[in-house]
Image (cartoon, rainbow, N blue to C red):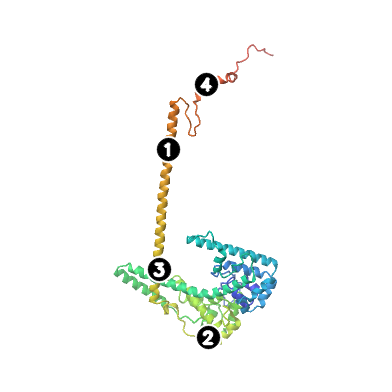
Amino acid sequence: MDIKRMNLKPGWLLLLSICAGVWSVPIDRNADNQEAKAEVPEENVDTGLYYDRYLREVIEVLETDPHFREKLQTANTEDIKNGRLSKELDLVGHHVRTRLDELKRQEVSRLRMLLKAKLDSTNTQSLQMDHASLLKQFEHLDPHNQNTFEAKDLELLITTATKDLENYDTERHEEFKRYEMLKEHERREYLKGLDQEKREREEKRMQELKDKHRQHPKVNAPGSVNQLREVWEETDGLDPQEFNPKTFFKLHDTNEDGVLDEQELEALFTKELEKVYDAKNEEDDMTEMEEERLRMREHVMKNVDVNKDRLVTLEEFLKSTEKKEFSNPKEWETLETSPLYTEEELQRFEVDLLDREEELKRKAENLHQQQELLKERGKALEAQRKEYQQAVLEMSQRQKEQQAADGQPPAGPNGELHFQPEAQKEEDKAEHPAEVHNNLPAEPPQNLPIHT
């Protein structure tokens, strides 16, 4: 989907942003030749939601209906977020409803497969599985109606996606916190395996790397005048004395939809992040850089996004430049300045990690035992097969010996009789003497007249 072509209200973009997000790239300009902004190719960004594809497809189908599209353009943020817009579904065309019904049936089928796979993995009997009850755990569709797409389905889809997006950043922070604790746990375990001399030398090396990482230039507060001016001058290639917030906004609204979405905002922080992180340096962790980028974006959204729709309008942006914090912000504290977890949290994490490792060991041991059992069964089956083959050979040998004693021609493996070639020929001659005579070579004719 192309947001620029749709020209929709920011409220609907709240939902569309998860389906047609654009990775905004800072514009590289030449001061001597400031050309018009080139088109930036748009790229769909996966939301991380387990129903991402379903959400995208529903929105794409709804956009094909002129009536619904018109309602989207006039709807406000609250109408979309609280699901009131879903009532307009009754007025869409028949072909749109038919396609939405098909999408829902496909989604229900997919969820059923997920449920079955989950039940199979836990060895749960699913012969009498109540799909309607199990589908209730999925909040983005109506589980009681599994065949048609109704207004309630659209309402549930919008409200669930909005709620899940609001929790998405929190989940990312928790995931990063676990990543940092795991990294510290592995560091300590590595040091435990060294003798005292090597451990002291390695601890010194690690501390030097940490100190080197902290020796970076000062980072401007994201969204402050100094931070934006730096982008204006070094990235956009413009005169710092001519900095203009309105022009800056339009320059970095790369898809020209009238708002700065989360990806366009995060692109503004690349210059600041490069002061702290370099993929070539051993001491710099690129996973930490992305967490820093997320923290910067949240900081700007908190101070600028007045209606909390995860989008920054030009009006919101200009108002933020009038605040005191814009010109005199607090010093930005990067990740290394404050701990992300306490020692108690790390200890609890290590206990949980140990429990999971023990559980995995038990499962691995159980699988190993099952594998050994299958090997033993395979060996037993192979031995039985060989015994059967030997018994068949012995039976065949005894049968041949018995037939030889009785004067019968030998029999083949399937009981068919085998005759000697010479004996067969003599028998054929006795039974068919005329055929033998006819096969004799003809004598040359005698006393034939000679013609001159």
Q: Amino acid at mark 4?
A: Glu
Question: Depth-wise, is mark 2 or mark 3 nearer the camera?
Answer: 3
Vertically, is 378 above or below 88?
A: above
Taking the view exactly as shown, the residue that stands out farthest to the front is 128
Residue 11 percent location from the top left of the image? 61, 77
Judged from the image, the secondary structure of the residue bearing numbered disc 4 is helix
In the rendered structure, find residue 353 and report the number of the disc placed on it. 3
How far is mark 3 from mark 4, CA to CA?
89 Å
Task: Tell which circle, 3 or 4, labels the residue nearer the N-terminal end.
Answer: 3
Q: Circles 2 and 1: CB distance less than 8 Å?
A: no
How far is mark 2 from mark 1, CA to CA?
94 Å
Q: Which residue is mark 1?
A: 391
Taking the view exactly as shown, the residue that stands out farthest to the top is 447
Q: Is residue 101 in view?
A: yes
Q: Is residue 270 left or right of residue 41?
A: left
The quadrant holding residue 196 is bottom left
Question: Depth-wise, is mark 1 or mark 4 nearer the camera?
Answer: 1
How far is mark 2 from mark 4, CA to CA?
119 Å
Quadrant of the image for the N terminus?
bottom right
Task: Tell which circle, 2 or 3, labels the residue nearer the N-terminal end.
Answer: 2
Q: Residues within 10 Å of mark 4 (few under 14, many from 20)?
A: few
Judged from the image, the secondary structure of the residue bearing numbered disc 1 is helix
Q: Which residue is mark 4?
A: 426
Nearer to us in this view, 189 or 202: 189
Q: Circles 1 and 3: CB distance less than 8 Å?
A: no
The quadrant holding residue 135 is bottom right
Q: Which residue is mark 2?
A: 326
